Amino acid sequence: MSLLSSAIAGCTDSHPNLRSSPGAEGSSAQEVLDDLEERTFRYFWETANPENGLVPDRYPSPSFSSIAAVGFGLTAYGIGVERGYVSREAARERVLTTLRFLRSAPQGPEARGVSGHQGFFYHFLDMKSGRRFESTELSTVDTTWLLGGVLFAQSYFDGADPREAEIRTLADELYRRVDWRWAQARSPAIAHGWSPESGFIAYDWIGYNEAMLVVLLALGSPTFPAEPEAWQAWTSGYEKDWGTFFGQEHLAFPPLFGHQYSQVWVDFRGIRDGYMRGRGIDYFENSRRATYAQRAYAMANPQGWKGYGQDIWGLTACDGPAEAELDYQGRRRMFRGYSARGPGFNDDGTLAPTAAASSIPFAPEIAIPAIMELRRRYGEHIYSTYGFLDSFNPSFEYDVPLQEGRRVPGLGWVADDYLGIDQGPILAMIENYRSQLIWRVMRKNPYLRAGLERAGFQGGWLEEEK
């Protein structure tokens, strides 16, 4: 029996009829995952601007493009080929359109009329022009998610066809021109970002969170590399975050996206840096423990929110109902709009399906039942054209102005939108769980390997695949 089959054996709960979801009644877990993966892929394929490849930050609300969502889109297209959703030729043309646009998009220090500077891109771009959206920042981490997709495309499209050769060349140009040293405003750490109006953001990437890949790609650069001290600066913030949380000893970061995003592209199983060698685990195991800790938190439910339990859990960055302080069960509670959420951190009863679904490679035995139960119990309202809507809050039953989303009688609050940076990990992590596609492809990428080795990673596939 395959890993997938063993994990979902016996998970055959019935489901309600879902909006735009034919055949949901009585679906098996295998069928639910099939349906979720394809619907989530369609978000990127159908909402991207076909003229330039830019992917909206959110949909269906009118939106600018998120450069991070573009990176998830570039990763999605190879998945679509492998799953038979689109042809290799169609995916190749979409990738080429995207990379050609990014390569030619103007760069410079000006506040207007450009898409980026020093090889980095602004966090949000206008969907049509591709130029900086309003006063958004030049983002090192969002550029990194873009580069994750760029480098995946470089290694995935490895054929002799001239168009695939062009993909590889364009990807190389985009990666090589990023000046990581420029972004080390307080060397050896890497700054969060920059803007022409105020210069570098006052924060650096130090301590465990979603940005491991920032430092790894900076270390792997053949043109403007950071030195290994950048990784030492990164890990210097770890000790304050190591401990036992809800029964799991691990390096903590409350929202689950911090344990997921870099691992979309990096297979950390069996490879360890100096810090994790000292702890006797790897980052994959750390994320498995963080996933279990979130589930334990939901089962304990110390805040008394509605719905939380063994198969209903998942706190991460997501949309929320409103910025409002309201009475809930006799206590004043702070509810939030878009925010990062985690155990004991901005928890306002808002759950995000991406939190559990994107943890599927780490702990399928608890993530798959969560996906099943989320769809069974709430699917009529939170599951539609592109899979799971971003978030929902069964505890929010207030007649106050909403920041976004809608009230649903008997359920509470439900988001109206899908978010690209939450859709991307769902799709990618389901595929990594099923076939290890992105991990396998990225293990071949020389830049990622160089970054890992310069950071001091050893063992596992780094030794086996030399």
Image (cartoon, rainbow, N blue to C red):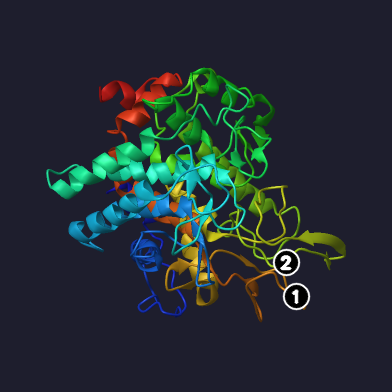
Q: Which residue is mark 2?
A: 322
Residue 14: name its quadrant: bottom left
Query: What SS does tag 1 mark?
Result: loop
112 or 136: nearer the viewer: 112
Query: What SS does tag 2 mark?
Result: loop
Q: Quadrant of the C terminus?
A: top left
Which residue is at the far left? Answer: 160
Up-down relation of residue 209 to residue 242 (above or below)? below
Q: Position of residue 338 (x, y in %)?
A: 65, 59
Q: Is residue 116 left or right of residue 236?
A: left
**Three-letter code for the amino acid on which mark 2 is drawn:** Ala
Q: CA distance from mark 2 to mark 1?
A: 7 Å
Which residue corresponds to the image point at 44% horizontal and 50% vertical from the top-left? 360
Residue 169: name its quadrant: top left
Q: Is residue 222 left or right of residue 246?
A: left
48 or 342: nearer the viewer: 48
Q: Position of residue 55 (x, y in %)?
A: 43, 60
Q: Is residue 376 left or right of residue 402?
A: left
Up-down relation of residue 415 to residue 313 (above or below)? below
Which residue corresponds to the image point at 35% horizontal and 46% vertical from the top-left? 103
Q: Which residue is mark 1?
A: 401
How many marks are shown on the rendered structure? 2
Up-down relation of residue 293 to residue 237 (above or below)? below
Q: Is residue 238 left or right of residue 265?
A: right
**Three-letter code for the amino acid on which mark 1 is drawn:** Pro
Q: Position of residue 149 (x, y in %)?
A: 37, 46
Residue 52: name its quadrant: bottom left
Q: Are marks 2 and 1 in contact (CB under 8 Å)?
A: yes
